[in-house]
Image: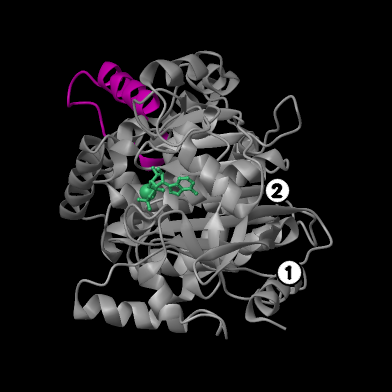
Amino acid sequence: MSDTLKFTQSIINGYNTKGDFILLGSAILNNVPQKEAQVKLPLSTLNRHGLIAGATGTGKTVTLQVIAENMCAKGIPVLMMDLKGDLSGIAKSGTLNPKIEERHQLIGIPYVANATSVEFLTLSKESGAKLRATVSEFGAVLFSKILNLNDTQSGIVSVLFKYADDKQLPLLDLKDFKSLLNFSLNEGKAELQKSYGNISSASVGTILRAVVELESQGADEFFGERSFEVTDLVKLDAYGRGIASIIRLTDIQDKPKLFSTFMLCLLAEIYQTFPEAGDIDKPKLCVFIDEAHLLFKEASQALLDQIEAIIKLIRSKGVGIYFCTQNPYDIPEAVLSQLGLKIQHALRAFTEKDRKAIKKTAENYPISEFYKTDELLTSIGIGQALVTGLSEKGIPTPLAATHLRAPMSRIGTLSTDEIQQIVSTSQLVAKYNEVLDRESAFEILNKKLQSIQEEEPEEKTPKKTVKEEKSTIEKLSENTMVRQVGRTVVREVTRGLLGVLGIGSKRKKGWF
Ligand SMILES: Nc1ncnc2c1ncn2[C@@H]1O[C@H](COP(=O)(O)OP(=O)(O)O)[C@@H](O)[C@H]1O
Ligand SMILES: [Mg+2]
């Protein structure tokens, strides 16, 4: 048997599927795509996570787009973190040009132009459905992490969250949390001290400054209501195709901490909301994180541990997570070892360090009798990549240098008008962009202060006892609060989950 035949046969066998699949392209031998050697990803393995890596300009984002749009076409909703704005093109049909025509002739499949239904979401002021979470939902642990607090300060945050829970003071936005901080320094000091131990003003001052800094990063847009329901991420369009939810994050590049915390919160909420999926024909949802190094940059070890734990667990919910980054080593080893699909675009060897990284990368791919992997890594072209995935039986598929298909949708960004047009007809935008500022800690505490001032015009009045103090708050919150019981339960469970995952706050003696 000739080498070419042997190669083609090994790819056909290795990538054989019983169930439905996504076709990525054709495997290359000696620089020529072999039309019969189709590289397929079985839908049933797509919750096993993946990585798309490679140097800038080698085709990572387009590969992400190809996989995401084909998932949608197969009825799998996707969620995409768009850090550069170049994923929006998925919403419009692509156009055939000579290059794409040639590409598809080489692969041996016809080019089809098609658009995917999308929803644009935003964490900031960009247009799209506002993705928000309340401070309470974040939980004390995560909230302290995002503020970069030390153990003592985190302990105080936990106390304040607990106090707000006990007193039914909704902590919706940063304004609420700030007023609670102020309250703990002034009118609430005695009461908090009695129930939870001493709270140092210096620490509260530090927390307050951290909150103000977070606000200045634009986080006040993110904290508040209406809380986003993750079930809105798993919608199908009128044709039964998955909807692509694109989170527009172009303005978050310089705020990696906000990004990683937000991602973790989102994944934790997905994990907690979705039922166990068992064996699946196809995933319930796939999440794509472009420029994923930002997720791990500056993330503390505790946050990394948590991301790792969630990634391990979320698979059983039928959710796949795909990281897209330049260097595979941008992704922590523990996360890398969990990824079923690896797509490696070309790497550039400028320095000794680069060459070492290439060798190491090559060693992490299955050995192939047909390839010199390290050489291929620097020589494959744009829109080509080394692929290894999982068969339906969970066995790694043979290494295939793949000539990838072109996206059905547009390569590149949508214009502002095009985005606006989609946003203006979005049902999610209608649901989430209504301004809500229901009565929460800020208003309740303000009212309380007012009533104290009215009742006690002179200092003569004896100080209220702690007992009376409590009842004032309770009275004030009783009628004004409409508690979202469902969400509160979710929140508690999520917090519990985050605790279970090993980063429960370090509680100091005497606080609880
Ligand atoms: N599969 C593909 N089909 C067609 N063109 C591609 C493909 N992959 C890459 N390209 C071309 O290469 C360019 C750069 O790809 P891109 O995905 O933006 O690179 P990266 O994300 O790695 O920086 C694209 O704009 C497109 O013109
Ligand atoms: Mg890119």
Check the image and report above or below for 427 versus 271.
above
Q: Is residue 8 visible?
A: yes
Question: Residue at 62% of width from left, 31% of height from top?
Answer: 114
The residue under label 2 is 284
Task: State the quadrant of the N terminus.
Answer: bottom right
The residue under label 1 is 12
Q: Main secondary structure of the magenta part?
A: helix
Name the spot of residue 297 as percent of width and height, x first.
30, 61
Instruction: Name the element at disc 1.
Output: helix
Check the image and report above or below for 354 versus 84.
below
Give the farthest residue toward the right.
18
Q: Quick check: is 463 in the magenta stretch?
A: yes
Question: Residue at 69% of width from left, 49% of height from top?
Answer: 274
Name the spot of residue 470 as percent of width and height, x first.
43, 37
Check the image and report above or below for 252 versus 439.
below
Q: Kindly identify the amino acid type of the residue bearing the numbered disc 2.
A: Lys
Question: Residue at 75% of width from left, 59% of height from top?
Answer: 44
Q: Kindly identify the amino acid type of the residue bearing the numbered disc 1.
A: Ile
Q: Quadrant of residue 49?
A: bottom right
